[in-house]
Image (cartoon, rainbow, N blue to C red):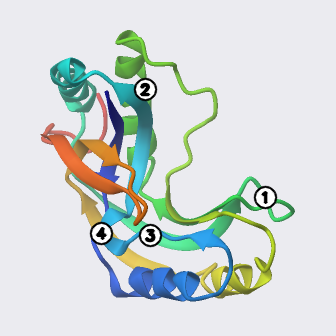
Amino acid sequence: MIRTFVAIEIPRLPELSNLLDRLRMSGSKVSVPKAENVHITLKFLGDVNEGEVDRIIAALKEASSGFSQSEARMIGTGVFPGQRDPRVFWVGIEDGGATSMIAKAVDERASGLGFEAEKRPFTPHITVARVKSSSGIEKSLGILREYEKTDFGSFRIEDVRLKKSTLTPGGPIYEDLGVVPLTAGGPSRR
């Protein structure tokens, strides 16, 4: 069994790297991803048999077939589920709805393969920290607030990736199992 998810990769941008470094050194009990591991999760699939990978990639090709490459911008910060009990720190994505439409198509195809459909609405974001303990969290929340209106920069959404996640004591190691380019003629799903 391999642990998998579907994602859009994010380039390393200086302002985002700066935020990650500051959160990592805040002294708060938060888990901060390495800059090279930052991504937009479209769908977490969980543990799958290696023999299912080709079927999943074929489903991703079908799901992605109506989408073109598009521009996106990383802007602002926030927390899930809310300020009273923050569990996830995020950077927002503005893209005219592109990642939401792709995520919906991926979810529909994955559901057809037997994966559970998403119950919550998709909110495009990048996870920049996960809270391990609320003790001493004020310092990292203060850092996050400093970036709440920051424009981290733009990037191009070029493909959808099936990723393997290997959990290690030093953090997860991600590996591409399949890369599906977005190549449709129109700017959005047809």
At x 64%, y 33%, the residue is 120
Q: In this orientation, does residue 133 appear?
A: yes
**Secondary structure state at the residue bearing disc 4:** helix
At x 28%, y 42%, the residue is 164
Q: Specify the label residue 186 is tagged with.
A: none
Q: In this orientation, does residue 105 appear?
A: no
Q: Earlier in the sequence, mark 1 or mark 3?
A: 3
Q: Report the Cα–Cα distance between label 1 and label 3.
A: 20 Å
Q: Earlier in the sequence, mark 3 or mark 4?
A: 4
Which quadrant would residue 18 be assigned to in this image? Answer: bottom left
Q: Residue furthest front?
A: 169
At x 33%, y 46%, the residue is 165
Q: Report the Cα–Cα distance between label 2 and label 1.
A: 25 Å
Seen in the picture, residue 89 relative to 163 is either above or below; the reply is below
Q: Specify the label residue 36 is tagged with.
A: 4
Q: Specify the label residue 107 is tagged with.
A: 2
